[in-house]
Every structure is written in structure tokens, then in C-alpha cells.
Image (cartoon, grey):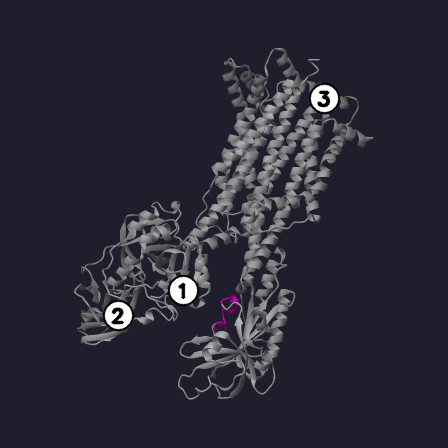
Amino acid sequence: MRGPLVVKRALGEPLLLLAAFGSILLTTTTLVALTMYASSIAGAGVRRAMETASYRQTTTTVSAQVDAETFPRYDRMVRDELAAAYGAPPAVTTSLRSDSYVVPGQDGEELPELLRFGSHDGLDRHARLVAGRWPRTGGQAVEAAISEPAAAATGFEPGGEFVTKARSDGRPVQVRVVGVFRLDDPVGERWAGEELLSRGVERGEYTTYGPLMVTQETFVARFATGVRAVWAAEPDLGALTPERLRPLAEAVGRVGERLPAAGCVSCLTVGALPELLVQLDTASLVARSMVLIPVLQLLLLAAYALMLTARLLADHRRMEVALLRSRGAGTARLAALAGGEALLVAVPCAIVAPFLGPPLLALISLLPWIRASGVRPAPQADLGAFLVSFGAALAAAVLLALPAVAGARRTYVEEQSALGRGGRRGLIQGAGADLALLVVAGLAIWQLQRYGAPVTATATGGLGIDPLIVSGPALALLAGGLLGLRLVPRVSRLAERLTSRRPTLALALGAWQVSRRPLKYAGPALLLTLAIAIGVVSMATTATWQASQRDQADHRAAADLRLSGPSEGPELGALGRGTAFTTLPGVTAASPAFRAPTAVGGESALLLALDAGRLGELFRLRPDLSARTVAQLSAALAGDRTGRLELPGRPRALTVRVESRAAAPARLVLSDALGVWRDLPLGDLREGGNRIELDLTPLAGRAGTITYPLSVRGLVAGEQAGLRLTGLSADGRNVQVAGAVAHPRGVIAFGPSREPGPLPVVLTSGLAATLKLDAGQSGSVRLAGRVVRVAVAGIVTSMPTSAPDEQAVLADWETLQAYELAAAQPSRPATEWWLAAADTAPARETLRRNPQWDVTAVDRRELAAKLRDDPPAGALQGALTLGFAAALGFAVLGFLVNAVVAAGERRAEFAVLRALGTGPRQVLGMLATEQAFVIGPSLAAGTGLAVVVGNLVVPRVVLTGQASAVTPGVLFHVPWADVATMLALVTAVLVAIVAGLARRGWRGRTLEER
């Protein structure tokens, strides 16, 4: 009988139970979806990281010296240890390289060209034959295949035979070339340590060709004479889960210890996989902590929405419960009825929610900013989802039944006497619980400010999620909302006084109604405030995170494309690199740069020199990091510069004629049209006249070209030399040197002989504090071992391209070179090139096709995409989107239910108003006035609360994937246009609800009228 009574009782209040059903379904579905998202985003992030990780990051290499006897034993040992570490045998490739052999026909030469033999497992999977076939084992002649570049350089062809001798012992080897192959990706990381195999030729003191690739069996039998063997393990990490990250990292990291203990004493293990796995484990922890923040906010909002609905239901049935009580129904029976009714609503939600979670996540994944992250979670309704769903539904059922159980002890007389004018202060405000909650929230936010992240160090030395810090944002929002309720009675009384003096009936009635029962409107006002605050915080967090990712990319790269590498090489010389880089496709601006750690004022700092005139195009500095703009810094950095003697034409040779009073070494300082400076040694000058011939072609390199015109900047020798430039010829054409002037310290330069003024520099704030210098001040500083007078052109909080907490100095490229010349110091090489380009992809492709240029590129856009795809970023944005949608759902649902119930309770009042001649507009005005006390202050308070709490919390929860603070510091961003649009849409929906209720209340026929 109890079952049917529960059903009949539930059907008697369909609206409120339908609202409770909607709230519980929204809660369980969103919570299940967030739980699925948190677990799946971690797994998807790990899988994606493994898919996009480079060969170098995922491969573990073991190297050892082997011969024909030790190789089989070491090979078995290495493979067994790797299989034990990974839990399954990984794909292991073995690479061997022989000693040097002499190219046929060059046996008697002093510096003969050389050959090397090699073996590589599975070479046929990474290369294709151009001619012939792959070598086989056996036969008197060694069968070998050669790479296409090596074949072109040596002239070897399939079918050709020759005899080569070992350089060490002269042992002859008969070789038959049977094939020519081409690597599929010669510039790939797989061949990073195999330059000879990828290029075919190595040039140094000796020129070496090869390697001539033979089978492993042939190599071990014929060439394994104390040579180096390399085993490369490529594990299949596609099914790696977050739980296995740290154990696998520890197991792989111990391989280097276990191999020597097992007998491979010369084995050396190298690999970046353990570090990558630890980083991913930390990133997964950060992602989970990020998801917990909106989860707790959602739980808070859901709990309050359910309590509000339960209170409305209990108030609606208070007389019914009192009558049942007076007719003998005990507390236990009433509690059972309330509990059964709550379960009747909650259980279906618990069953349905796990099946609604995956399609909800699929819908969220279609949003542009989520789809752009590249992470595609694939959740399923598993046992964990059902446990979360039933747990949430059970908790919701308890919250739904609590008010009914609490009111089951009151009698009919007590309920009648409770009707009438409501109280002005709730239980929470009366007990001061809101103030206590504010203290707890303040403590949580203080800890967040102190530790800088919700992920903190644990007692065991690892990382863990601090529950108090994670709950801080939710507690702060709730405390702020509860404190705001203290203003509702005061505001309503003030509005009542103001409107009572006006002739408008609707405003007076509406204000009087709110003033009469302020707590009745406080519930929906708090719900709407919390929902709006959570929505605005979610939007601000997403905007802040995205802006921080762009700021980090700009700060790390500084320019659109930053190229680093040796300042000169055999392919591109010192004056050839700039030409190659500035002519890359799409490049619109460029500057040579010097970037290296330097001792400044007794501590290590990054010294950065750039063309000050190009800072506006190449130097991305966030405006808040400096009191001066980039344009102002650019103008202030240009200091005293040296003159130049421009050489006519495009000279390839230079003749220098100088007179010296004493024997001394000297050098000529030259620069090209791109601003690259290069010192050319003139050798040891003798006393008297000297004539030095300089070949300029090596400055370009084998594949480079010089950007003309060239300019002579000066000559440097010791002061005792008394150097005098008497003549200069470029390709035989005399150049006037009348402008050459002797400067102090044995320097000849072009321009007036005077000491340069202070060197303009930009300092980081920490370094400026150490040096006790401020913007606009000058002082003497020890820079790179010598005292230099500097003028501070500006101070920045953090210097672009610097590491976190690294101090730095920025100077103008030309000015710094002029100061070095004046001090008789060597010119600064161009260690980097900073390039501006609207699209860097064509330039990157050109660099990829020219690995011989030996360039490392930092692409700002590529870096931004990598930061955007970080697991914490994807996790937080998806979770915030879900939380934001759920918050708006709770707000609209709670407001609708409260408004409908309130309107239903006042049907008699509407009937009296109609009988007195009140029109529909006045009824609408009265309801609008009442609900304006809910809508207006709630939207304003929610937005303000979100800005305050977000400003305190959001910059602290934006972290790197390694749970560290980002550089530069995070700026809180509120997307005001999006917030205004959201508030306008919410207001429109709520106003439409009020208008519909007014129309329904006016047209409805009540019992009193009949």
C-alpha cells in the first residue's frame, strides 16, 4: 500500500517533482560526464602525447663496444633487460659501424679517402632500393648496398667489385656492390646519429664515404673488431594508461643500472622516455586537479538547487503533512513517504545518466575551442560511471527528502501559526555560518596564493591534489553569495519606501511583496547569483588560459621564427647563414642576434643583442612587462655606433696594407649588408710594412652566398703595434682609406676618435635591483669580465626567451658590436637569427629539406599550438564548458520552478486584483518588479563576485603541464563581450518566463471568481 501511496502523492505535485527530476538528472549526467571526461582526457592525452612524441623522445638506446665473441651475449642481454623493463619485448634495431677502410687506389696516400661498413636491422623498412637488391650473407666477396648520396660521391654501382684494406691492420676485403638505396626520410630523427648514412659523406680531416651496408651476420663475422654497437628500443606505447606512466618510467630508468650488473660492463644507456613519462604523469595529475574545480562548483550549485526545490516542495505540503500527522502518521512513516518519493525521482536519473554522458561529451567535443585542442576522448558507460551516477543520485535523494523529514514533527496548529509574514534573516545568517564559510574560503585562497597551484608536494616527496585548495573557488563563490543575501532585506525595505510614495500601483505592490517576505526571494536569488558567478568564472578561466598560452608562446619564441645553431659551418659560412635565412619564403624582417649566458654584476644572466630598429617586428613583449613600449625601448637602445668603409662591388678577395711599429697579431673586422660582423685574422704582423691577402669566399660556405655590400669596420692590434692602415684593395681595385683613424687600445676605426658613451641596455627587474639601477640611470657594471658603463633604457619584469626567474640584459646589436670594437674585444657572433613571417610553414619546410645547415628552429605558432594541446588545457576547457552549461541550466530551471510555484500560490491575490480592475500590464509590472529583485541584483552580484573570486583564483590555477607556474605571469582576462551576451540571453529567458506567468495568471479562472 505504501508504494501506491508514494506514487499517488508524487503525482499530486507533478511540477515540483518534475523540477526535482530535472535537477537530479542534470546533476548526475553532468557529474558522470565530467568524471568520464577527467579519466578519458588523461588517457587520451597520454595516447596523443605518445602518438606525437618524436623518435628521440620514445626510443631508448644502449651502446657498447663489441667484437665477434661478445656481441651475441650482449645482444641477448640487452633484449632481455629491455623486455623486462617494458613488460613485453619492444622492437629493437641493432646498428653497427666498422673501423675505417681505404678507398681503392689510395693505399699509399698520406690522407686517403676512407670507407666504412655498417649493418642496420630492418633497413629495408625505412629505405627503398633505387637499383639492384639487398645484400645476402655468404660468399667469398662481401655483398654490400650503398646509399644514393654515397654512390654518387664514390661512383660505385651495382655489380661492381673492388678490394679495400683496413686502415688499422691492412687486412684486405673483397666487396661486391649489389644495390643502391634511398632513405625514406634522411632528415628524420631516426638518423640523427647516423650522419654518414643519411648524407653519404663526412668531411673533416679525412673524407669518409659510406657506410657500405651488409647483413648483421656478415658484419659480426668480418668487421666486428672492437666496434661500437647500438641497440635502439622502440616500444609500442599506444595502449599506455596514466596509471602505468610512473612505474614504466622507473623500470626504464633502471635499465642503465641493471645492464652493467648483469655483465655488460661497457653498456651505456641513453633515453628521454623516463623524463617524458614523468612529465606526462604530472600533466595527468594537473589535468585531474583542473577538472575537480568545476566539479566542486557544480556539486555546490546542484546541492543548493535541490535544496531549494525540496524546500518549495516541503512548503507546498506543510499543511498536508500536518494533517497526516494529526491523523496518526508517525515521523518514520512520513520519512519513508518522503524518502520513497525522492527515490522514485532519483533512481531513474541514476540509470539514465551514464548513457547520456558519452553523447554529451561528444557534443562538447564539437565546440571549436575543444576541437582545436586535438584531444578526442572516447568515454564509455562503465561500472565507474554507474557508481558515480548512483552515488550522486542517492545524495540528491537525501537532500530532496531532508526538508520534509525535518518538518514532519510540526503539528497542524504550528504550521498555521508559521504562515504569515516571513522572517528577514535565515538560519545561516542568524548563526553567522556565512562569515565562518568566508574565513574557510579565505584560508583556501590564501593557500592557493602561497603554493601557487592546487597541486602541491606531498609528505612522501611526490605531487598530490590539495583538497582545501581545490575547493577554494567553490567555497569563495558560496560565501560571497551568502554574504550578498544579507543585503536583500535592506534593499527590499528601501525599495518599499521609495515605491510607496509613487502613484504606480505595480511598483508599490511588487516592492511591498518582496519586503514582506524577503527570504522567499533570497533562495532563487542566491541560486541565480551562484549560477551566473560560475558561468562568468568559467568564461574568464577559458579566456585567461587561452591568452596565457599565446603569451607563453610569444615569450618563449619572441619572434615568429627564431633560428639557432653554430655561427658558421662548412655548408653556410659566417656571412652565408644570414643570406640563407633572410631569403627563406615568407620572411619579411630579420635580425642577427647574440644570445648566451654572461656574467653580469657577479651573477649569471642572459645577454641578448638585437637590431634595435627591428624590435617592433621581431620582439614580442607583453605590454604589462615594461613601463615603456617596445617602440620607446627601440629608440632608447640605439647608442653610439662605429663608422664603416664600404667596399665597392662584390669582392671575393681583399688585400690589406698596414704598417706596424712592432710585431703583433692583428685582425680585420668586416660586416655584410645584413649587419653580421666577422673578425678575419691577419696573422702576426712584422715591424714595418705588411701586405696581407684575404680570401673572402670561405665566409659564404660551400652552399652560401654573401649579402653585399661588405664593409670594413676596423682593424685591431695591440697598442704597442702603433697600427696604421696604408691601403686596401678589393679584387684588385684600390679603396680610399683616408677616413681610417687610430683609436685607443690599438684600434683603427672609421669615425672620430673618442670614447663611446654609456651602453644603453634593458634589464630585468631582478638584475636591476641587484645592480641598484633604475630606468634612466647610468652606472658601471662588470659585464663579461670587464667593467662597462651602462645606461638603463628600460626595465622589464621578464625578458622574452629567458627561462623562468632568469635575469637578462638586452642591448642593440650594432651598438654592442661598436663597444666591443672600441674595447679591442672580439666581435659577437650571430648565434641566432630572428625572423618575422606571416606564415612560417614554407620557411620551416625549406629548413627541413636542408639538414646540413645545422639549424634548430623555434616556431612561435607551432609552440602556441603545442601549448594549446597540453592535456591540462584541454581538460580544463572541456570541464568548464560542461560546468558553464550546467550552471545556466540550474539557473533557468530554479527560477522557472520558483516563479511558477509563487504564481500558483497567489492565484487568489490575482483574482482580487482583477476584481478591483487591475489590468494585465499592471499584473505584469507587479511580477516584473518582484522578479527584478531576483534577476537584476543576482546578475550584477554574480558578475561582480566572479570578477573578484576569478581575479584571486584563476591566475593561480593556470599551470604548465609540469605543474609549475607559467612565464610570463598570468593576467586575468574577462571576455566582457561574451559575458554581456550571456547575461542578455539569460535576462531575456527569465523575462520571458515572467511575462508568460503574468499572462497565465491574468487569463486563468480561479475558484474565488467562480
Residue 667, numbered label: 2
Q: Earlier in the sequence, mark 2 or mark 3?
A: 3
Q: Is residue 857 left or right of residue 489?
A: left
Q: How far from the left and from the top, in percent, is residue 158?
A: 53, 80
Q: Are marks 1 and 3 in contact (CB under 8 Å)?
A: no
Type of the residue with mark 3: Met
Q: Decide which of 953, 891 is in the foreground and name it.
A: 891
CA–CA distance in space, label 2 to label 3: 104 Å
- Rate crowding at label 1 as few (under 14), some (14 to 19) or many (20 or more) other CA atoms within 10 Å: some
Which residue does the image show at 74% across and 32% down from the upper left?
A: 341
- Relative height, residue 11 to residue 834 (above, below): above
User: Mark 1 near mark 2, Cβ–Cβ under 8 Å?
Assistant: no
662 or 631, nearer to the observer: 631
Q: Position of residue 303 (x, y in %)?
A: 63, 35
Q: Which residue is mark 1?
A: 565
Q: How many marks?
A: 3
Q: Where does residue 643 sit, x and y in percent of width and height?
A: 22, 60
Which kind of residue does numbered mark 1 sit on? Gly
Is disc 3 placed on a helix, strand or loop? helix
Give the Cα separation between the discs numbered 1 and 3. Answer: 84 Å
User: The N terminus appears in which quarter of the rendering?
Assistant: top right
**Residue 568 picture quarter:** bottom left
Of labels 1 and 3, the one closer to you: 1
Residue 867 in the image, given as x and y percentages of width and height: 50, 52
At mark 2, the secondary structure is strand
Considering the numbered disc 1 on the image, is that residue within a helix, a strand or a loop? loop
Name the residue rendered at 75%, 21% in the picture: 323
Cα distance between the residues tagged 1 and 2:
24 Å
Residue stretch in magenta: 187-198
Q: Earlier in the sequence, mark 1 or mark 3?
A: 3
